[in-house]
Structures are given as C-alpha cells and as structure tokens.
Image (tube, rainbow, N blue to C red):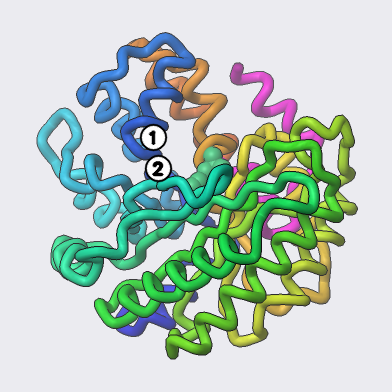
C-alpha cells in the first residue's frame, strides 16, 4: 500500500468502514461517566482495549481513528494498540486537531494548525496512514453558520489536508454540521452543501489532491429539537443531493459520522443511501457513538461482561457494514436486541 490514493481506496473499500475511537479525553470521560465508569486514564485505556481487541473486527473495519493518548498506549499485556491494529490489517488513523475555540459569540473554530507539519511527521514515523480534523458547524435559524465561520473552517481544513498530503498521510476532512437545533432537514442539507462547496474552493486554491482525501459528513436530517422524523429515503435524497451539489467526481470516498442519531436509525439511513444507484463515490461509515454505544452500556466497566460486550459491538459493526453495501434489513435489529 504505497500511494495516498491506494490508502484512500482501501479505507472506503466495499464491505468496510472506519471506527472513530478518537474521542478526546473530555469526550471519552463523558461517555464513561454516563455509564458509571471512573473517568481515569486507566479506564479510558480499558475502554479502548475492549473495542480494539474485539475478535473479527477486521472483517468490517478498514481503519480506526485514534486519539493521541491511545496512539501512544498499549493493551494490558503491553502490546501497543498500533501493533494490535497492524496485526489485524486495520489502517491506523490519528485525530490531529486540538479541539475547538470560540469564533465570535456563538460559533466555534478548530485549533491545531501551529506545529502541525512536525506532529504529522512523528505520527507518520510511528505508523499513522491517515488523519482526521473536525470542524464544528452550528445551525441557528438563518443566522448561523455565518459566512465568515464557513470560510475560516474551509481554509483550516484545506491547510490541514495539504499538510497531511505533504507528510504522506491521507486526510479525513470532517465538517460536522451539528444535529442539535430546531432546523429542518432542508436547512441541514443547505448548510452541508454550502460548507462543502467552500471547502472544495479552498482545496483547489491550495492545490490539495481531491483523489487522496476523504470527506466525513453529517447526514441531512432534521435538528434534534425539531420534532420531525425523517424517513431513511428522505435522508438519502437530501444528503446525496447536498453531495451532488458540492463534491467533485474525482473524490474517492465519503464517510459519515453518526452525530447522536440512534444506532438503528443511522444504520437504516446508511442502508437507504447505499440503495441509491446514481452515486459515483464510495460511501461508508465512520461512527463513534453508533458503533460503540450499545456495547458500552452493556459493559459499564465490568470485566466479566467484556466478552459479551464485544459480541454486541461486533453485531452492530456487522449490521452497519451490511447497510454500507445495501444489504441490511430492519428485521436484523432483532439479532442485536437478543444480545442486549
Ligand atoms: P459520532 O459518530 O459519535 O458522531 O462520532 C464521529 C466522530 O468522529 C466525531 O468527530
């Protein structure tokens, strides 16, 4: 696997997708606290070990995105997490943004460009094949996001992508349009389109190769407070229409975040997207919560429950991978329910 294009194609290969195991320390602690687990570095390490040592995940995972803490850590027996993934033939990714900072009164921008080339060089030497940078975009009526915020995010994402490609690392560009808010599905689609259009203007301006990057997007769905319930077909229609209006054909792959959608819901939405025949990109998953949530609730920090929690994780992974190929049926949820 030599070129950036080869790595990109492998990450979005049919039947497979990416696990986002890269929650920051703060987010990981929040997930652990929600199920009564102590917010310590040791429990974060065990949390990663539960998921990354699950037998057979390599059947469905092309890559895993790690947070720096895990990237430099090891499982209980002393084997580095990176070696565990390499042994399974899973590509190692690294979250390289350094979190968010305020942008004006109500918006956010992403930190982490200072010193990025040097950090990328170190990650590459240690075995990273790809990276991730998350931009957080808030919708509030017609006021947010502002065009200034969209522009700043696009410039940062393109600069990050250029740095990655120069370092021999495939960049995942993640403009996360937040689900939170009372907006309609149409408004979400409009914002996704606008943000992606601006990103590709900056990508062209900075000479980033569109064939050697991956876009990580939200789906176009109604805001979490809107009370609307979108059908999977509606989500597929509006999400793909946003992509067709903004993402060039040369882009190889697009992956989705789950964004707080329930696991069953986002799996059904991915299935509806995969059923659409007109798509020219590889489309797959890169979920954190939707892949890990059910197993995390079951495990809740109990060593004796690890093996069964891993079965739950593997089952959700299997269902999501089937959906990625358009082979999932909602009745299959019963197989997962039977494990809970
Ligand atoms: P969720 O799938 O939980 O939204 O996380 C994906 C991700 O990588 C957020 O940055």
Q: Contact, CB < 8 Å: mark 2 with mark 1?
A: yes
Residue 10 seen: no
Quick one: label 1, few (<14), some, or many (20+) residues within 10 Å? many
Q: Which mark is residue 21?
A: 2
Magenta span main SS: helix
- The residue located at (56%, 60%) in the rendering is 149
In the displayed structure, 262 sits above or below 155; it is above
Q: Nearer the viewer, residue 312 or 169?
A: 169
Outermost residue toward the front? 105
Ligand 1 within 8 angstroms of badge 2 C-beta: no
Q: Nearer the viewer, residue 276 or 14?
A: 276
* SS of the residue under disc 1: helix
Which of the two marks, 2 or 1, is nearer to us in this view? 2
Question: Residue 61 at x, y = what percent?
Answer: 46, 53
Quick one: label 2, few (<14), some, or many (20+) residues within 10 Å? many
Give, as a single range, the part of the protein colored magenta: 317-340
- The residue located at (88%, 53%) in the rendering is 233
Q: Quadrant of the N terminus?
A: bottom left
Residue 169 seen: yes
Find the distance from the CA under tag 2 to the CA under tag 1: 9 Å
Residue identifier under label 1: 51
Residue 169 on the magenta span: no
């Amino acid at each position: 696997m030599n070129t950036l294009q080869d790595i990109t194609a492998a990450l979005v290969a049919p039947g497979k997708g990416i696990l986002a195991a890269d929650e920051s320390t703060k987010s990981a602690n929040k997930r652990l606290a929600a199920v009564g687990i102590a917010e310590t570095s040791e429990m974060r390490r065990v949390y990663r070990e539960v998921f990354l040592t699950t037998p057979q995940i390599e059947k469905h995972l092309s890559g895993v995105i790690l947070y720096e803490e895990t990237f430099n850590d090891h499982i209980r027996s002393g084997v580095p997490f990176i070696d565990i993934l390499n042994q399974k033939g899973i590509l190692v990714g690294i979250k390289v943004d350094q979190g968010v900072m305020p942008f004006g009164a109500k918006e956010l921008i992403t930190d982490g460009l200072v010193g990025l080339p040097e950090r990328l060089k170190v990650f590459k030497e240690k075995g990273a094949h790809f990276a991730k940078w998350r931009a957080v975009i808030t919708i509030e009526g017609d006021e947010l996001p502002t065009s200034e915020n969209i522009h700043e995010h696009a410039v940062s994402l393109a600069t990050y992508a250029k740095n990655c490609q120069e370092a021999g690392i495939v960049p995942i560009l993640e403009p996360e349009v937040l689900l939170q808010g009372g907006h309609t599905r149409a408004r979400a689609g409009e914002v996704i389109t606008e943000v992606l259009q601006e990103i590709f203007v900056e990508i062209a301006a900075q000479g980033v190769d569109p064939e050697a990057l991956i876009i990580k997007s939200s789906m176009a769905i109604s805001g979490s407070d809107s009370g609307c319930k979108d059908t999977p077909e509606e989500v597929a229609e509006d999400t793909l229409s946003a992509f067709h209006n903004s993402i060039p054909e040369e882009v190889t792959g697009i992956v989705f975040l789950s964004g707080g959608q329930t696991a069953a819901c986002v799996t059904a939405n991915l299935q509806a997207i995969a059923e659409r025949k007109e798509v020219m990109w590889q489309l797959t998953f890169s979920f954190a919560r939707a892949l890990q949530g059910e197993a995390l609730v079951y495990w809740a920090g109990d060593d004796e429950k690890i093996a069964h929690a891993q079965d739950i994780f593997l089952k959700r992974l299997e269902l999501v991978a089937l959906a990625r190929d358009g082979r999932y049926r909602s009745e299959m949820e019963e197989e997962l329910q039977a494990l809970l």
